[in-house]
Structure formats: C-alpha cells, structure tokens
Image (spheres, rainbow, N blue to C red):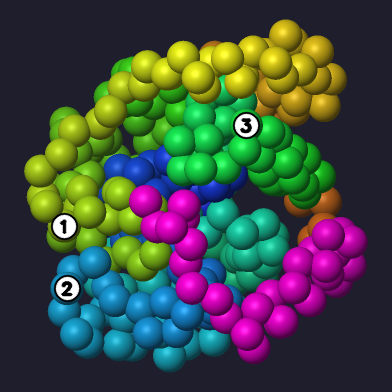
Amino acid sequence: MSDATNNLIMVCGASRSGTTMLDLMLGNSDSEFSCGEIYALFRPYRTHHFNPDCCCGAKPCIVWNKLSKLHESEFHAAALAQTGIHHVVDSSKDLNWVLDSNRWASHQDIPVKNVLLWKQPIDLAYSHWKRGRPIDYYRRAFLNYHERFLDLRLPYVAIGFEALVDDPENVLKKVCSYTGVEWHAGRQEFWRKQHHHLFGSAGTFKQVNTGNSKIRSKENFPADFLAAWGKTDAARGHDERLNYVISELRAADIVLGTPANINAKLRYSGPVKPFWYYHHALKYMYQKRFPVQLSSAEST
C-alpha cells in the first residue's frame, strides 16, 4: 500500500490513546528512529520538558546531543539523515505540531504517513476516570482532538486501540504495509530494543526501561464506573457529535478495509492556519514562560 522508502510517520491520537506504544512498535528495529513526543523538546511548556532525559539512560545521550540543537523545522530531515535510518516515527499528538510537520515535510520532499490511533469513548473515559477525572472529561478531550484533526483533512489511516491490543501482529502488519516499515516477527515487543525516545506515556516508558513486558488486553470495568458511564448520552448512543466523529474514524480504519482518506490533500498547506491553531499557539507562549509540573493524573 506504501511506496515510500524513507519517510516520516506521524502517530496521532488524543491523550491516553496508546500513541507512545504504537510509536515504539513502529520504531522497533535498527532502521527506524522512534523519537517520542518530540514537539515538547522544541516547544516546552512543562518543567520536565526543559531538561529531558533520554530513555536510554545516558547523560548526555549522544543521539540527542546533536539533534536537540537543531531548529524545529530541520529536525525530521536531520533524524532521517542518520546512518541506517529509513523511517522517523513521531508521536507528538499536538495538532499544531502535526500540521507544521506535514507542511515542513512537503517543502523538504519528505513523504509523510499519518496514523491516527483512537480509543472507543468508553475506554477513553475509563482511562481518565481511573486517574481521578470526572466521567465526562473524556468527551471534551475526544471531540476537541478528533474534530480538529479531521478539520486538517490530512491523508491518514485510523486504527482502533482495541484492535491493536487484541491482535497486535495482524494490525501491525497492515500498518507496516501502509507506512513502508518492514514487518518482522516480534515487532510488537517494543521493550526489547534500546530506544531513544523522549516524553510520552510514563507507563510505557517504564516498560521500555524494564525490558520485559506484555501488551495488556481490554480491561474489566468496575461497577461504579459502569454506573456512571451508563448515565451518559454516549452510553445510550444519543451523542450525535461523538457518533459522527466515530463514523469518520471507522471510514479511515485500516483494519476494516481500504481507508478513504489516504490520498486527501492537506487543507492548510499555505500560510493561513485554523483559528484554534493561533489560540493554541498563544496558550503555549504563556505556558512556556510559566511552565507547570506534570500532574499526578498525567504521570501514570
């Protein structure tokens, strides 16, 4: 499905959707470089973004000692220029960065493969709920991210998180075919490689450090969560905005068939950006000046 030899793979998705895990799976051989949520290195807004530690444990890391000094628009091209690297995998979920990265790559003749990993609303709700957030927190996170992502009209394929954890080998084979990454047995065992990724899921980061893990299948929801979930419009199928977004993601799902959005044209290829882009950029400028620490809910 892909004719790309060297390319950039953008792994997108709302917070708590498993993007760090997919990033590391796609970067799980010597010909790929999994860089994690690299946008936070160039656009820091949390205290731990300013002096990051590479997951390899080296201080300083010889990989990042050079790459971290580049201008943000030069990063992906320089990462691809590393000896033996054919694919750079970037799981920066930030949509400003996703848009900018697609535009930079087009100007530098770097093919881009956008992959959107998404969770069913009930699964995303539970991921946030078990970390102390209210039952309806997921809805704003889900809609804000996916409606804006769809607004970009990027060429992309979607993957359901549930499908990935239930059958990682077959799902990854399809993703590898799309991205041009060579499939090999055990690619899903991302913890077996010494990676050099930054930021992302703290839980997945720990799995890489231990070098021994397993992919968790669907969780059993506790009764109190199910009671709260049952009162939501989404549980009853009455949330029209959610239903529309889900139908769009299913139409782009690489497991369900041939996605309709593979050859879409980027909507904002020129200098004009969507309104939310400028709002987010202003928010970032403030946060960079007054960074905050990672909350307990975000650190697990």
Q: Position of residue 79 (x, y in %)?
A: 39, 72
In the image, which residues are magenta?
271-300
Q: Residue at x 54, y 15 (%)?
A: 226
- The local secondary structure at tag 3 comes to loop
Q: Which residue is mark 2?
A: 57
**Residue 135, numbered circle:** 3
- First of labels 3, 2 by sequence position: 2
Instruction: Please determine whether, in this image, residue 258 is positioned above or below residue 214.
Output: above
Cβ–Cβ below 8 Å for labels 1 and 2? yes
Disc 3/disc 1 C-alpha distance (Å): 32 Å
Query: How would you rate the neighbour count of disc 1 (Cα within 10 Å): few for under 14, some for 14-19, many for 20 or more?
Result: some
Q: Position of residue 182 (x, y in %)?
A: 29, 40
Location of residue 177 by image quarter: top left
- First of labels 1, 2 by sequence position: 2
Q: Do we see residue 299 in this rendering?
A: yes
Q: Residue at x 89, y 67 (%)?
A: 272
Q: Is residue 23 left or right of residue 123?
A: left
Q: Residue at x 23, y 61 (%)?
A: 195
Q: Position of residue 27 (x, y in %)?
A: 30, 51
Q: Do we see residue 9 in this rendering?
A: no
- First of labels 3, 1 by sequence position: 3
Query: How would you rate the neighbour count of disc 2 (Cα within 10 Å): few for under 14, some for 14-19, many for 20 or more?
Result: few
Q: Which residue is mark 1?
A: 209
Outermost residue, front direction? 224
Location of residue 143 by image quarter: top right
Disc 1/disc 2 C-alpha distance (Å): 9 Å
Q: Is residue 292 magenta?
A: yes
Instruction: Check disc 1 and give the amino acid type.
Output: Asn
Q: Nearer the viewer, mark 3 or mark 1?
A: 3
Instruction: Check disc 2 and give the amino acid type.
Output: Gly
Q: Is residue 200 magenta?
A: no
